[in-house]
Amino acid sequence: MKKGKIFIFILISLLIIPSVLSITLTIEKTSSNEVMFPEINKPATMQLKISNLGSSTSLEFYNLMGFKMSPFGTVPIEAGETKIINVGIYPKEGFNYRGFYTFPYYIRGGDGTEIEQKITVKMVDLENSFEVGSGDVYPDSNSIDIYIHNKENFNFQKIHSKFTSPFFEFEKDFELAPYQRVNFNVQLNRDDFSKLMAGEYQLNSEITIDDKKTNVEGKINFAEKDLTTTVKKEYGFVVYTRKISTVNSGNVVSNVSTTIKKNIISRLFTTVSPEPNKVDRDGFDVYYTWTRSVNPGENLDIIVKTNWLFPFLIIIVLVIIVVFTKQYSKGNLILTKRVSFVNTKGGRGEELALKVSITVKANKYIEKVNVIDKIPALASVYEKFGGERPTKVDEKGKKLEWYFERLQPGEVRVISYIIYSKVGVLGKFELPAATCIYERDGNINETTSNRAYFLAEPKKNNQ
């Protein structure tokens, strides 16, 4: 009976003594949303408020999942003491899980007894932890505000970021507290984006933390703005020049229309660049109109030159022609060349057709008369001929020949043919002089004709 009582006492003691000797704590977790980044060796920090309801002891924190926990040693706590302890949970190598992850951890007392707790940690990649963006930028902007936002409950103490976009490049070292947003003002050089169209462009941030790099992308809105300026300049007297420059400093395509008026006299001595889109006539006036689409950063230069030297040159040429005509009239043979415009059948505006006429007039008796005429390289000969047919047609060499056995004094022969070209011509079109080789009193002589010209103008646009 006595032995039985001793056994019961020992059994009760074994059950009661551990409870009396085990640590007695109240644990309150005062933090939330702990975050861990597997790429960097920075701990997720959990804050615990621990009150010791038992005797003085020391606390140790650990888990069985392989995550290192700090403090790495023991933390002493006196009887009745309340402490705030920051517990760090470090990433472990090869852990690829992303999202919320819950696992148990343990608080062990100095007597070897322990309490089991649980923690939930959010596993996040660095690239998903930041947001970058900017305000709107305009073609005339001198600066832009950009920002980077920490979306997680984590204190980044040292960050280096390189921001790049079509508008600028910018580097900065800074810190980011949990959920903090930092703004930067970046100066702009307008030449860097003068040719960009309005729209959204990419903003890239290369973020470096503890030698680990990640890229975060955002957007920059290049807002639409039409900035078109026109500058007109006039200079020169003998060669009068008018220059109209239109510059598109905006970021949208600008449709520009420019009209210049000339009279029927001055337009004969006027050259324009580039070629106008439309030419209209109203009485004695001629209107040249340019309609162009100018892209951002580009400019349209219209140059109109009127050379008043041309009338004087024409007078001189006429005098020379008269002089040569008189000399020709005194010679054995007079060779005259003319050219006129011919409308093509079907009205195909892309073809240029000209009728060439050569008049051969003998003042004296001549023999073995061979008339040679060359045609421009871009032209072809129409197969039908008016008047005298050529004795030889050299298509490859672009040459026509007519042969007459003899011509009596005062005899006239008229040669004509048609040339055409599918390449349009604008301005003065020149034909080479014709040549005639003949014999007179046993001597070989040569006579050349005048040069023939044709003035081609832009076709009128009736639309």
Image: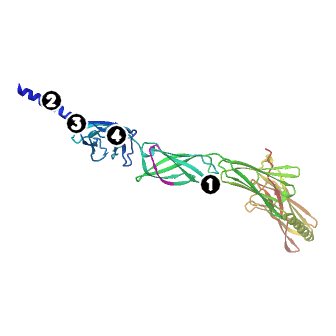
Q: Which residue is mark 4?
A: 48
- Secondary element under disc 1, as helix, strand or loop, is helix
Q: Which residue is mark 1?
A: 190
The disc labelled 3 sits on which kind of residue?
Ser
Classify 278 as above or below 372. above
Q: At 86% across and 52% down in the image, what residue appears?
A: 285
Report the span colored magenta: 171-179
For the stretch drawn in magenta, the main secondary structure is: strand
> What residue did someone put label 3 on?
22
Return the residue nearer the eye: 442 or 38: 38
Magenta region includes residue 23? no
- Residue type indicated by callout 2: Ile
Can you tell which mark lies on residue 12? 2
Residue 292 picture location, percent across and down = 72, 50
Q: Is residue 176 magenta?
A: yes
Q: Residue at x 56, y 49 (%)?
A: 145
